[in-house]
Image (tube, rainbow, N blue to C red):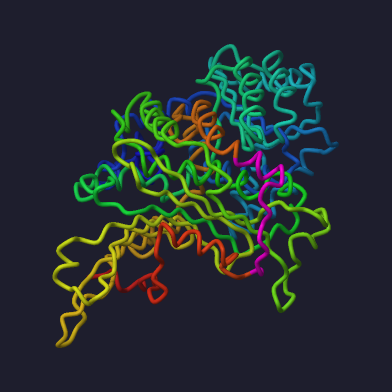
Amino acid sequence: MAGGTAVLERPAKVAEGAPATKEEVVQAPAEAAPAAKYLAESLTILVIGASGDLAKKLTAPALYQLFTRDYLPKQMTIVGYARSEKSDEELRKAWRPVLLEAHEGEEETIDAFLSKVVYRRGQYDSAEDVAAVFKEQEENEQADGQQVANRLFYFAVPPSVFADIGAAIKEGALSQTGWNRLVVEKPFGKDTESFEELSKTINGLFTPEQTYFVDHYLGKEMNQNLLVLRFANSMFEPLWNRNYIDSVVITFKEDIGTEGRGGYFDSFGIVRDVMQNHLTQMLALIAMDAPVRASGENFGNYVRDEKVKVLHAIKPISIDDCVLGQYTAPDDGSMAGYTEDDTVPDDSVTPTYAALVMHVNNPRWAGVPFVMKAGKALDQKKVEVRIKFKTPVAAECMFPDVRVPTNELVLRVQPNEAVYMKTNVKMPGLAGVPVATELDLSYRTRFDDKMADSPSAYTRLILDCLRGKQASFVRDDELRAAWKIFTPLLHDIDAGKKQPTKYKAFSRGPAEGDEFVSQFYKRDPTYEWHPPAKGDAKM
């Protein structure tokens, strides 16, 4: 959960049977036991679109991680639901290799998990088909005199069927004795208008307390850590404003293209795919003011209230405030260019790269540029935030003929999760020249035992849903505010008002992108961060 510990708390049933360690006493929040109440109740998870890649590659592994950690009730069934003809065993065979690849040597545990999985075929718009599934499940839900039947509906399907399946669930599948919760995956529309249609549909069927909009980046370790880093360290909050911060750069780089999903990607582009959602959520966490509370009952709305205030303070992005790019084949021919993909139209002008700038127009951030850049088929895989501080006036006076490196706080989201601060020290030797180094916290070095068993973002988010915690899910007013920022730009891109510049795959992207970013952030080409070796962290 945003603002909470990154370590999954022990379920109450485990804590009752074994003494807690000192670490667990320190880390477990006070609300952990009430939140685990669902473990003593029955649970049916309906995975809608169970035959698809999302369910197989992300939902199933997340549920398996919860199963192995005893975060799913014993009285639990996972029902895969889709339109295709399939048996229970065929679904299990489809999911099993993915689980085995990530959990080698756990065959018996995987088989125990899959024994809880069944498959039922049905139409998405048929209340009768959905009702039949739960009529069948009632016997399992009521076994051993169980009085409470909770139901989780996981939408691993395109938005085009949300209305149909939502109406079918509303009519024929809601529990009368427990909670009903909906987990909805992005995309949440393509612009403000389509989002409003989606929001109207879902809000007409379910309450906000029942609806969990997933942005899986909010479940990532470093993003979960942001509120703790910001507000639990006295050194940062006094400096976290326009007086000390020069710029903020949020970077998303992938070293792969769109192979296999070019058709999907071409209808969205890089701005819709990652910037309007994932990177904007990161921006909101970085720029928000302190919430009234970040733990305890119903704290999620306090966190999201502050994020919404940030988004409302950002003006819509102009087409003039961005650079667009599209990758071509590299010189060695090791990858096809974007438009050479068989699933992409030959004349596509969909951007695979974008760099843009936004400003948060409030007293804390007035005048500070927030730069986003994202792209596919770039020179490396990396997601990070760089917070660049202003050069101290004293340094300019003391070292008039020396370029003093600026301080930067860098939050590395992936890979190699880390927090490091670029600081200045004297170069060893006789000359008093300042040189950049870093104060470094590499998560896999410092928390090696925890990171090896670290849950996936989806695991955390599904657990939060089971516990009824919504802080790490996106509220509809957040989505609405984000779409208002990006919709004018997206409409201009769709109308062809700016053509993407070509760039070679595995490069840094178009040269115009670096030139654009350099207006707001000066990159030091001589500096490169190296994650510390494991032994370096030991004293």
Q: Horizontal placement of 213 versus 533: left or right?
A: right
Q: Where residue 163 appears, x then y in whole percent?
A: 71, 23
Q: Residue at x 82, y 33 (%)?
A: 83
Magenta-span inclusion, residue 495: yes
Query: Vertically, is 304 above or below 65?
Result: above
Question: Which residues, given as a range, are shown in magenta?
Answer: 489-505
Is 238 situated above or below 160?
Answer: below
Q: Image quadrant of residue 191?
A: top right
User: Left or right of 69: which side holds 87?
Assistant: right
- Residue 301: % across, % down: 40, 26
Q: How many marks?
A: 0
Q: Is residue 395 left or right of residue 459?
A: left
Residue 411 pos. (x, y %) = 38, 56
Q: Nearer the viewer, residue 266 or 365?
A: 365
* 27 and 278: which is toward the camera: 278
Residue shown at the point (61%, 30%) measured from the top left = 192
